Amino acid sequence: MVAHVLRLRLDLLLGSFRGERSRVIRTVLGGAVFIAAIVAVVVGLLSLREDTVAATAAVTVFAGSALVLGIVLAPMIAGFEDLLDPRRFAPFGLAPRPLAVALLLAAPIGVPAIGLIAVCAVFAVVWSEHGAGGLVSWLSALLALATCLVATRVSMACAALLLHGRRTRELTGVIILAVIVVVVPVAVFLGSLEWGGIVPPQLGEAADILALTPLGAAWAIPGAVAAGEGGVVALIVAVALLTLVLLTWAWFALVARMLSTIERPILTRERGGLGWFAVTPGTPAGAVAARSLVYWMKDRRYLVNVIVVPIAAVVTVVPLLIAGVPADLASLLPVVLMALFLGWMPHNDVAYDSTAVWLHIVSGVRGISDRLGRLVPIVLFSVPLLAVAVSVSVMLHGRWAVLPAVIGVVANLFLAGLGLSSISSVVAPYPVTRPGDSPFQQPQRAGSGVGSQALVLLGAILFSLPSIGFAWIAVTSDVSAASDALWAGLGAGVAVLVVGLAIGALLFDHRGSRIMEFAEAA
């Protein structure tokens, strides 16, 4: 069976160059672009032979980690069709384990795999000349290659299971937001470094962290050996081997699942279906989250708030600069204000539902499901926005050492705001513009809600004072306090969020009739 699968893989590779002329041209052009990229990577790796061991280690670990991350995310984003999808072999009654082995052995056949092999071979050559030893270098290259190939199979299998049976537009959007959280901050970090002909120390520190993760462990072994770090070598090798073992186990489990489950037919057009309801889990919290996401995407009242918060946060810097506040300090304020107001935004979310809140009450949705579901849209929007804003603010500030402090304050304000908003929207909802009306129209009804607005804002600031204090020390005098600010912020933020959700859920269960009275009267 292995020989048959290998011949099939070769036939598919050659078949991509046959057929319609337009398809063949696209295939050739895509292959040419890929080969050019591989050549550029190979030339860059070969240039490292003249650099120091530390510089070579930093660059190879960082580049290798980026390669593995790209391999994992590419099928999810682009939706590549796997020509050797295990489900294509289901009619033949093959056992899952032999089929999984055969598909793994066929993985090195293909243009992308050949490019990976070339990169790993040059990687081994470079480290052989840097004192890591030929055996260690080539074994590390084989381990890195195996990790990439198995990760590719696992990622494509996950994409086939997750994206094919659902409406991919919404789920792909969520994946892209997740990519933004990782890629943009890293790009900002690299773009802000002052290279000056040598590898910046910040990049070396980042590489040391990546070396202990599944992304970069296999690529870090030769560098650790060449540097004589015996204890670290053992830990890195353990992480790399464990990563490959877990990926292989995941691949065998996915093949078994794909061969033993019946795929549900798609009876609607690609852009039809249930939208977010097909993406979120089939639970009460998932249904509330889907309905909230639909509102956030369609309702102008939400969209205006989403646009106004970042703009207002950035505008606040102008009067501070005019008043003489140093630019490095003023650059950190917008992201802090954004976190505060983004956590505050759901404080009156029940009122925006208007009478539609009866769906939750009459269907017996528990308070915790309502509270959790309503937070999903603001979290999906805010986390990528804050990730980018934090990176840009720290870059403008000029000291990446304060990054943990900024993350701690931002997380504290945002999570505390969400926790307090989960209580406020149940206890003290106030009238808002009706659905369909202009978001800038002031409702002519009693009750302005100034008290609840102020309490949520002040409460979030109050619970964030410890992290703010540590962050101020880190920015102005002792940068070692940045880690204290991080853990204080995360701890306080998570605690307030959990307690706020619990209290808000309990109040929602006991105030259903009052919430309906408010919805009818507002």
Image: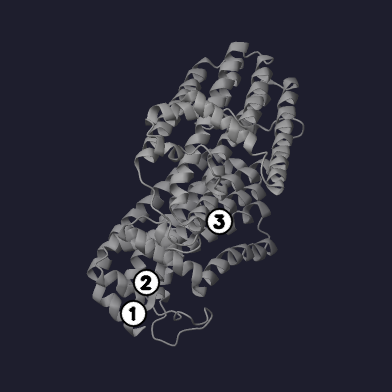
Query: Which quarter of the rendering shows the C terminus?
Result: bottom left
Give whichever of 397, 310 is nearer the camera: 310
Identify the residue at horizontal 61%, vertical 30% (top origin): 113
Say which label, 1 or 3, has the lower sequence index: 3
Q: Is residue 211 visible?
A: no
Give whichever of 405, 437 is nearer the camera: 437
Amino acid at dot 2: Val
Give whichever of 11, 412 is nearer the camera: 11
Label 3 sits on residue: 385
Marks 1 and 2 close (CB-CB < 8 Å): yes
On the image, the x and y values in percent for residue 401 come to 59, 40
On the image, the x and y values in percent for residue 213 come to 50, 31
Disc 1 to disc 2, C-alpha distance? 8 Å
Query: Is 513 rendered above or below residue 313?
Result: below
Query: Is 390 rendered above or below residue 292?
Result: above
The residue tagged with tag 1: helix, strand or loop? helix
The residue tagged with tag 2: helix, strand or loop? helix
* Other residues around mark 1 within 10 Å, as few (<14) / some (14–19) / many (≥20): many
The residue tagged with tag 3: helix, strand or loop? helix
Q: Name the residue furthest left.
A: 510
Q: Which mark is residue 350?
A: 2
Amino acid at dot 1: Ala
The part of the image, by quadrant, that contains residue 204 is top right
Q: Which mark is residue 296?
A: none
Label 1 sits on residue: 519
Amino acid at dot 3: Leu
Asked whether, in this view, residue 214 is left or right of residue 455, the answer is right
Identify the residue at horizontal 39%, vertical 31% (top origin): 94
Say which label, 1 or 2, has the lower sequence index: 2
